[in-house]
Amino acid sequence: MNFLRRLDLGSFFKLTTRERFDWITPACVLCLSLFGVFFIYSAQLAREENDWIKQLVWLGLGLVVYVTTSLLDYRLWLKYAHFVYLAAIAFLLLVLIPVIGTTHGMGARRWLGLPGLSSAFQPSEFAKIAVMFATASILTGSRLGTVKDSLQVLVKLALAVGIPMLLIIAEPDLGSALVIAPVVFAMLFVSNLSMRFFAGALGVFALLVGVVALDVWRYGNFMDANHLNYTKDRGAYEKQSWLPLKDYQRNRVLAFAMPDKIDPMGIGWNSRQSLISVGSGGLTGKGWTEGTQAKLGYLPPAVAHNDFIFSVIAEEKGFLGSITVIGLFGVVLWNGLRIAGLARDRFGALLALGVTVLFTVHVFVNIAMTIGLVPVKGIPLPFISYGGTFVLSCCLLQGLVQSVYRFRRDF
């Protein structure tokens, strides 16, 4: 916690301790949500779909979730963290049952269907919150020093984090699983764990990247040697590999590293069209609803209003609109760190930090994906991308940060 307190972020904003409600984040979130509604409408205008209305409904429900969560003392979650965690594990197991979980896209089973709604609830979003609660709870009640002294805590954390990550990967939803790791490591970092642990973790990460790179290289050679099509013969290599990856996931890596190797009308299409969208926006953009990439279907309808919504904003509002969105997110993230530094206890600081890192990963990966800096992953942009469970989870998470701020001093 000393790391956060040394930042002295509270004095930067010069807010008095008498203030009981933080208005900085809610104001930014409102602006981002309006951006989302307007550009979801624009992305679907040519097809006359009305997901923007559904987004408004989700945001209305999210407002209720946000206010309720912010009014509750965040310490309540410390008491019930293990119940939330067990519920998340139960939901993740249920979604893997064929008669209960629903399948979309590339055969991924990620949703629990409800009557009238085929993809109403996504357990992986709930699992991110549960893992955050569990990690903060374990670290709050533990003393960390050297890796040797902290071995028991690390083993407990490995189990608490590893089980939901494996269940999420089994769906498969690699993007959601990978988001969890940076959150846990950030919480460990501010808990004063020995730097030897992070050095070792960095080595393991480098090894895993090397293993995945080797596997993707072997995949490319296998497909070429057998004269197979990367798009049509999906699944041919999976039985040959020792890694639990799907061939469409390998295609995404290849499309990023070697775009000419993959059919540009196949897996590399979204990335190419996103780059065209961003590049054609110029300084001020083509104007709201005047973008052509989504309107003409070059940016596919399935992704234009969710994972690639930033591409639509960049095309229609240009660099100025894009930097405005990034600036709003920057304020939200900076304010999250400030509130973590103001927290009155370790649990509150860990929660605020965990939420901030989670949002940082989502914002960075989503925007970097649209401009070709990272492989395409199904990681949405908070408050802007269309989505029900994701919107509610974002509102709940920011409500937790607000609660940490409100209860930083006893009333």
Image: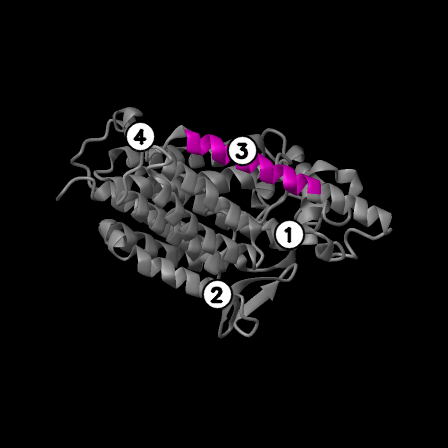
Q: Indicate which disc residue 245 carries.
A: 1
Q: Are marks 1 and 4 in contact (CB under 8 Å)?
A: no
Q: Indicate which disc residue 4 carries.
A: 4
Near mark 3 (Cα within 10 A), the count class, few <14, some 14-19 or many ≥20, is few
Which of the two residues, 227 or 148, is positioned nearer the viewer here? 148
Earlier residue among tags 2 and 4: 4
* Placement of 137 over or under 234, stated as above or below: above
Q: Nearer the viewer, mark 1 or mark 3?
A: 3
Callout 2: SS: helix
Which residue occupies the extreme front position in the image?
Answer: 148
Q: CA distance from mark 3 to mark 4?
A: 26 Å
Q: CA distance from mark 2 to mark 1?
A: 19 Å
Q: CA distance from mark 1 to mark 3?
A: 21 Å
Earlier residue among tags 2 and 3: 2
Q: Nearer the viewer, mark 3 or mark 4?
A: 3
Quarter occupied by the C terminus = top left
User: Pointer 2: what residue?
Assistant: 93
Judge whether residue 404 is colored magenta. no
Residue 11, given in percent of the width and then of the height, sits at 25, 25
Q: Are marks 2 and 1 in contact (CB under 8 Å)?
A: no
Earlier residue among tags 3 and 4: 4
> Magenta stretch: dominant SS?
helix
